[in-house]
Amino acid sequence: MVKRGLFVGRFQPFHLGHLAVIANILEEVDEIVIVIGSAQYSHRIDNPFTTGERLTMIHDALKEAKLPLQRCWIVPVPDVHRHMLWAAEIVGYTPKFNTVYANDPLTSRLLKEAGFKVKPCPFYKREVYSATEVRKRMLQNKNWETLVPKSIVTYIKHVDGVQRLQDLNRTDKV
């Protein structure tokens, strides 16, 4: 039986902390299912990137890091906004998995209650590597590029992601 782990995130954007967690999980499992949560959201201050953009960023970062793409599933899953249905939604969208790797209390609780083994994943310099911090630096025109893989910098510049975020920030204040 394939030992497959599940890791859920919004990846808004994907950063070096995410990459470190995925690399660590891959040391324990045969395959990893990377769930792009809140898949239906984009062009919002807290979710600026589309599902397709996030999928591309994750793929490019894993490739850049020379992680084994053939052992990685990247699966978008929309929010259902009903906790009693969320675990079933995850199961319905993903290949079968044995272990959930999560630090988020709600994710952990819901998937434990659904009968899954849940393991905490060690944060990698959490005080530095967070998508909130990356977006904050983008908004303030501060150095965000050191917090993400080089391929992500290239991709975000390609989609004009910093300007998009700054435009969204102005829209939210109107």
Image (cartoon, helix red, strand yellow):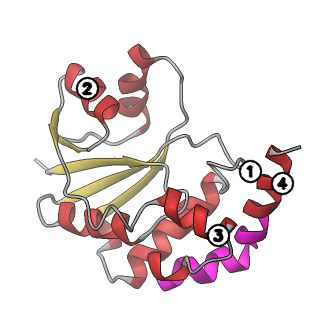
Query: How many C-alpha atoms fall within 10 Å of the one at disc 1: few (<14), some, or many (≥20)?
Result: some
Choose mark 3 or mark 1, whichever is in front: 3
> On the image, which quarter does residue 160 sit in?
bottom right
Disc with the residue nearer the chain's start (2 vs 1) = 1
Tag in front: 4 or 2: 4
Label of residue 109 in the image: 2
Q: Residue furthest right?
A: 174
Task: Please tell me the numbered disc located at residue 170.
Answer: 4
Query: Which amino acid, mark 3?
Result: Met
Q: Is 161 covered by the magenta stretch?
A: yes
Q: Which segment is the magenta one? A: 150-164
Q: Nearer the viewer, residue 157 or 26?
A: 157
Q: CA distance from mark 2 to mark 1?
A: 29 Å
Relative placement, left or right, of 19 versus 173 is: left
First of labels 4, 1 by sequence position: 1
Residue behind mark 1: 43
Rounded to the nearest angstrom, the CA distance separating label 4 from label 3 is 13 Å
